[in-house]
Image: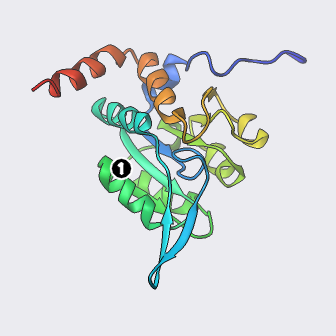
Amino acid sequence: MAGSAIDKSKSIDPTLAKQVRVVAFDLDGVMTDAGVYMGVAGTERIEIKKFSTQDSVGIKLIMAAGITVAIVSGRVSEATTIRARELGIEEVIQVADARKIPPFRALLGRLGVEFDEVAFVGDDIPDVPLMKLVGLPVGVGNAVPEVQELTKYSTVRSGGAGAVREFAEALLKARGEWDNVVNQYVVSRQE
């Protein structure tokens, strides 16, 4: 359909959504606004990143639906390790050279999951190789054109500003699990 734009932010294909067993997120630019604050405290180098608390709830809801959540970052950062630990994300890949496929392939092998059973959320060119392999490539609202042209779903919100939470809701609604997971979440925190 030359000349017509497809609105990828409307919904996720339920068939694709139901086959997802692993949701993997890039970190910088997806779970953060891509800003990295660096400095020195005494003699220690420090790195600070800002994360959305709404995204935290989205990740918890995905996990409550029985889907494995992973972080796949092209940078090594203690802030990433701390954030993953805080959220209970056990599958964390951090590679200094942004070569994400070999360690991610090993993770999927260990989990017994195929690439077509994976949703990957990215924002920039280092995410393109992995996005080309997964069954449900997702871009955040401010993703670069190279990412957007590969996506089957795009968030309206930008990375670090609720895009993860938006994707979580769209995925779980497409799977028909949203209401149940939200109700369980609320009930578990009532007392």
Q: Residue 102 at what x, y percent from top left?
A: 54, 62
**Would you say 80 lies left or right of 189 here?**
right
Which secondary structure lies at badge 1? Answer: helix
Q: Residue 189 at what x, y percent from top left?
A: 17, 28
103 shown above or below 13: below
40 shown above or below 167: below
Q: Of residues 86 and 118, which is closer to you in this image?
A: 86
Residue ranking furthest to the left: 191
Q: Residue 120 at what x, y percent from top left?
A: 54, 41
**Quarter of the image with the N terminus in it:** top right
Residue ranking furthest to the front: 42
Amino acid at circle 1: Leu
Q: Residues within 10 Å of mark 1 (few under 14, many from 20)?
A: few
191 shown above or below 109: above
The residue at which mark 1 appears reads as 111
Q: Residue at x 50, y 66 (%)?
A: 47
Q: Residue at x 42, y 56 (%)?
A: 107
The figure's colour scheme reads rainbow
Q: Residue at x 28, y 32 (%)?
A: 64
**Would you say 81 lies left or right of 160 here?**
left
**Quarter of the image with the C terminus in it:** top left
138 shown above or below 186: below
